[in-house]
Image (spheres, helix red, strand yellow):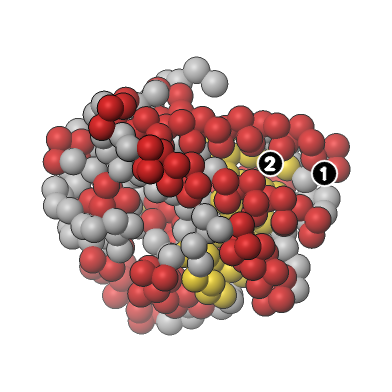
Amino acid sequence: MNTVKNAARAATDSGSQFTEGHKVPIYHQDAPGLQSEMKGPPPQCEYLPDEKGGYRKYQAAGKLQDKSAIITGGDSGIGRAIAVLYAMEGADSYIAYLPEEEKDAQETKKLVEEYGRKCHLHSADLKKKENCKAVIDGALKAMGKLDILCNNHAYQMMHKDITDLTEEQWEFTFATNIHPYFYLSKYALPHLSRGSTIINNASINAYIGRPDLLDYTSTKGAIVSFTRGLSNQFCSKGIRVNAVAPGPVWTPLIPATMTDEAMEQFSSPIGRPSQPSEIATCFVFLASTDSASITGQTIHANGGVVVNG
């Protein structure tokens, strides 16, 4: 582990990301957005809030020792945080990402390797089912087995009215956000066994019905239902399927897809957006035996919004 790099990274993190009232900087990137080009305090993938509103290093306990995980969208944001926390818990990862996200993916690989685990990279457009099959095949070849599938990647773009939402964007969002979850799960399940897990990234928007993200919100609702149905197919075989529904989280998706107005309101009842590391802890929990009696469920890591499940 490169302790010098870790110390430097800790020293430069102000911890303001975890203080009440933290506001994200308002600026914009081209989609899909790069974490390496984000302004302001960087999204956190290794640190969690402490009792004083600062931050502390994630405390691992070997919960995923020698496990192998596929993480889509693993180049940045929540996906990067999952890969890093999984590495801290002892797991290797195989991350899928878009070609234009190569720079961020290489940084994720470096962070994972600092914790002594392997991170295999796979650049692909997951809208194509043959590319989803290639991800599963590549992961099995690289890691020899598969224990965890994290369907995490997503696309969104804001429109206030359905009349402004093009048919092309509607189809693109569904082709990105839900179809690959089906393909990846279908191709992975023959290689999973009792104790394996699938974890899908949903969203608070599936429960609150956000109007300016109609297509994205619809796909996230589909993910929740897909999680429930798939869980019922495989729970008797000891393979658990769950979801996480984040609220506002500071990731590259925000400056790449949100309006100034939406970014000004980007917060939650706890007084700030969440950090990717805080969402990734849910993915650790659902992948470990700590959640052995939980399947078909959704964890609402949304900063305090009460929703109807």
Q: Is residue 49 above or below residue 72?
A: above
Q: Is residue 213 visible?
A: yes
In the visual, does 136 lie left or right of 155?
Answer: right
- How far apart are the two marked residues, 2 and 1, measured between alpha carbons? 10 Å
Query: Relative to residue 3, is residue 88 depicted above or below?
Result: above
Residue that appears at 23% across and 51% down: 255
* Secondary-structure class at tag 1: loop
In the image, 267: left or right of 178? left
Q: Quadrant of residue 129?
A: bottom right
| Residue 182 rendering spot, x and y as whole percentages | 64, 46
Residue nearest the observer in this picture, 10 or 228: 228
Q: Looking at the image, which residue is at 43% across and 82% down?
A: 2
Q: Position of residue 183 (x, y in %)?
A: 65, 51
Observer-nearest of 101 and 8 = 101
Residue shown at 15%/35% (left/top)?
261
What amino acid is at disc 1?
Gly
Label 2 crowd (10 A; few <14 / some 14-19 / many >=20): many
Q: Which residue is mark 1?
A: 238
**Disc 2 residue type?**
Val
Residues under numbered marks 2 and 1 in contact, where contact means CB atoms less than 8 Å apart: no
Dot 1 alpha-carbon crowd within 10 angstroms: few under 14, some 14 to 19, many 20 or more: some
Q: Secondary structure at mark 2?
A: strand
Residue bearing mark 2:
241
Q: Where's residue 83, x and y in %?
A: 52, 63
Residue 214 point in image, percent of width and height: 37, 30
Residue 90 in view here: no
Q: Residue furthest top?
A: 308
In the displayed orientation, state which residue is furthest to the right.
237
